[in-house]
């Protein structure tokens, strides 16, 4: 039976969820179903070459958005509607003056991506030093009630834990095929010899933003310096490759072993990642973390659980000896706040999701101020073949579990049959 699906991704700020929506659209289309994707025009490049119909939208529709969606429903006659994230879509509606209920359609099977498992996390996000951010621009109670009214939730693994929730689907990135020879050529092009070690660190534009929070600005600019400091202690043949919109002033600290690259095409980025000896992130939810696992690159994710206004408070919280270089770094870094998604925070928000999560166990999840553990882990994963093999085995076993899950499209089709 051929079905028709309308997938709605209104927010131009929800890139990751739009990628998931496009993946599900492609999967549904591949089964022979008819798919229409309503997507914000700034995300339209995601649909290039797609085998399904896409329609772009922007803020100019304003309050007429609901009428436009009604028109699509009348012309496309979908048997299901899939929201790329109810809260992101609702916020777009609020921003343009439309009623967010316009995406909640009666008598049509409605699904929503639930990327954080909001029943566990709630809708209040901790940011910076005590600041909070609400997922919804409208009434939190109204939006939560509306979200709960959606009958089917699609929860991506990772980051949602395996085997603990309905609607869990595999969310693994598509990757390019990289040969050993091309990986070697990629390293040589960066000026990294065969005997040297290469570590990748990535940033997005929002991680370089000019935050109003003093703590946010300090952490945004100081963490890469500490990463470079740790790597500088490990060996003279360890290089840091940074892919991001802006470079950091790290050349002197790494004696010319810092290599900055601007944002790259997907195939070029895959070539870089596949050629690395190690990947470091400070964002537990970054899709690149999973991609590194797929490419069999050992992965370390840094986080922080210390809230401190002064250097003295940090030193007291650490309660263990630390180096003079870390003490000097702290002078420019404080105040500090807990984070698992640098430099925003999300520490308390994501705690229910990360607790006893095999995703966290599959990688190295380390307090970024635990310099002894950070240094020893980085050194072991770069130079100890047994330790490196153990880490890759953990990652491989976790990916095998994910691959046993259904796709988002398979869940949608199964639920509609039921």
Image: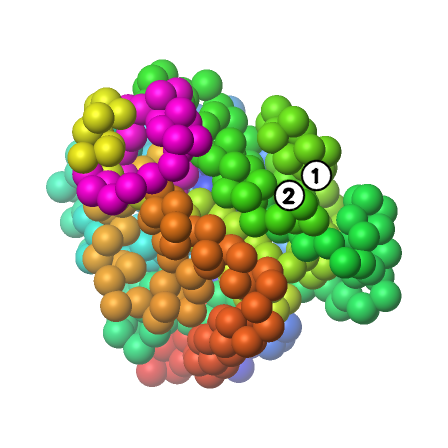
Residue drawn at point x = 46 percent, y = 56 percent: 376
Q: Which residue bears the numbered disc 1? A: 257
Q: Position of residue 76 (x, y in %)?
A: 53, 57
Task: Return the x and y of residue 165 as percentages of the image width and height.
Answer: 27, 72
Residue 175 is marked as none
When the figure is inspected, residue 35 is found, relative to residue 135, above or below; the finding is: below
Earlier-in-chain disc, 1 versus 2: 2
Looking at the image, can residue 126 be seen? no
- In this picture, residue 225 sits left or right of residue 312: right
Is residue 341 highlighted in magenta?
yes
Q: Position of residue 166 (x, y in %)?
A: 29, 73
Q: Is residue 105 left or right of residue 278?
A: left
Q: Are marks 1 and 2 in contact (CB under 8 Å)?
A: yes
Find the magenta span and give its range.
Answer: 317-342
Residue 406 location, x and y as percent? 46, 78
Q: Residue at x 21, y 26 (%)?
A: 312
The coloring applied to the image is rainbow
Q: Quadrant of residue 142?
A: top left
Q: Residue at x 58, y 41 (%)?
A: 232
* Residue located 72% across and 42% down the image: 264
Residue 188 vertical placement versus 93 (above, below): below
174 vs 117, left or right, is: right
Element carrying mark 2: strand
Q: Residues within 10 Å of mark 1 (few under 14, many from 20)?
A: many
The residue identified by callout 2 is: 240
In the image, residue 396 lies in the stretch drawn in magenta: no
Q: 384 above or below 322?
A: below
Instruction: State the residue in front, 178 or 139.
Output: 178
């Amino acid at each position: 039976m051929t079905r028709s699906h309308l997938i709605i991704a209104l927010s131009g700020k929800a890139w990751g969820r739009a990628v998931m929506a496009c993946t599900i659209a492609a999967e549904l289309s591949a089964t022979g179903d008819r798919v229409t994707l309503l997507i914000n025009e700034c995300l339209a490049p995601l649909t290039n070459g797609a085998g399904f119909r896409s329609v772009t939208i922007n803020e100019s529709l304003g309050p007429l958005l609901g009428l436009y969606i009604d028109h699509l429903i009348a012309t496309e006659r979908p048997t299901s509607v899939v929201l790329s994230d109810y809260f992101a879509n609702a916020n777009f509606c609020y921003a343009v003056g439309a009623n967010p209920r316009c995406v909640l359609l009666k008598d049509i099977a409605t699904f929503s991506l639930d990327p954080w498992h909001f029943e566990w996390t709630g809708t209040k996000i901790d940011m910076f030093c005590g600041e909070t951010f609400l997922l919804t621009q409208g009434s939190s109670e109204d939006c939560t009630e509306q979200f709960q009214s959606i009958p089917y939730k699609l929860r991506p693994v990772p980051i949602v834990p395996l085997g603990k929730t309905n609607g869990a689907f595999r969310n693994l990135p598509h990757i390019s095929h990289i040969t050993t020879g091309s990986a070697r050529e990629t390293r040589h092009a960066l000026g990294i010899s065969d005997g040297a070690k290469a570590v990748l660190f990535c940033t997005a534009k929002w991680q370089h933003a000019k935050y109003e929070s003093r703590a946010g600005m300090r952490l945004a600019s100081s963490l890469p310096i500490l990463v470079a400091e740790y790597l500088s202690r490990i060996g003279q043949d360890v290089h840091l490759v940074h892919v991001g919109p802006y470079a950091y002033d790290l050349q002197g600290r790494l004696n010319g072993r810092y290599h900055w690259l601007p944002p790259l095409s997907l195939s070029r980025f895959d070539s870089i990642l596949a050629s690395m000896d190690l990947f470091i992130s400070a964002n537990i939810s970054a899709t690149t973390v999973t991609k590194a696992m797929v490419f069999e690159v050992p992965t370390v994710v840094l986080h922080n659980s210390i809230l401190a206004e002064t250097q003295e408070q940090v030193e007291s919280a650490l309660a263990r000896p630390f180096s003079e270089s870390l003490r000097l770094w702290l002078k420019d870094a404080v105040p500090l706040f807990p984070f698992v998604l640098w430099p925003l925070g999300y520490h308390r928000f994501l705690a229910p999701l990360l607790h006893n999560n095999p995703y966290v166990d599959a990688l190295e999840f380390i307090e970024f101020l635990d310099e002894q553990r950070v240094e020893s882990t980085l050194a072991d994963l770069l130079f100890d073949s047994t330790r490196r093999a153990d880490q890759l085995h953990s990652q491989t076993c976790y990916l095998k579990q994910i691959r046993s899950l259904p796709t988002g499209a398979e869940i949608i089709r199964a639920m509609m049959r039921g």
